[in-house]
Amino acid sequence: MKNKQLWKSLPKNLAPNGFQFKVGEWAKHKGKLEMCESGFHCSENIVDAMSYVACEKLAQVEVRGKHLGQDDKQCWQEMRLVKVWNWNKKDSVSLAIFAAEL
């Protein structure tokens, strides 16, 4: 099965909730998965990912292993950051304008 690619919103230091991600390295959660509590969280849509964490970095992520899901968010046992972009106010304004034009 090919790994699924999703989106994650991150702080500048790539360390949400004290966990330090490194681009390209698989991170593995040991223990029970629980939405909003434990495991690695991401979303299928960028805007959904941004609704959970203030977006200073936007990451395309790859996931594998056990997982839980809900409408706008997923929780995975393993995750790695594939590519990371800086996100700033100008990007948010551009996104808002694009959405309004749709």
Image (spheres, grey):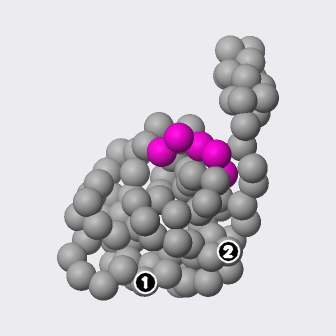
The answer to whether residue 2 is visible is no
Determine if the magenta segment contains residue 55.
yes
Which residue: 56% across, 72% down? 21
Which residue: 29% across, 54% down? 36
**Height in image: 67 above or below 29?**
above
Return the x and y of residue 6 as percentages of the image width and height.
57, 60
Return the x and y of residue 47 as percentages of the image width and height.
56, 38
Q: Which label was assigned to residue 63?
A: none
Q: Which label was assigned to residue 23?
A: 2
Residue with the mark numbered 1: 28
Quadrant for residue 10, please give it: bottom right
Determine if the magenta segment contains residue 97.
no
Return the x and y of residue 53 as percentages of the image width and height.
48, 45
**Height in image: 45 above or below 21?**
above
Going by the numbered disc 2, the residue's amino acid type is Val
Mark 2 Cα shell of 10 Å, populated few (<14), some (14-19), many (≥20): some
Q: Which residues are magenta?
A: 53-57
Going by the numbered disc 1, the residue's amino acid type is Lys
Return the x and y of residue 61 as percentages of the image width and height.
60, 66
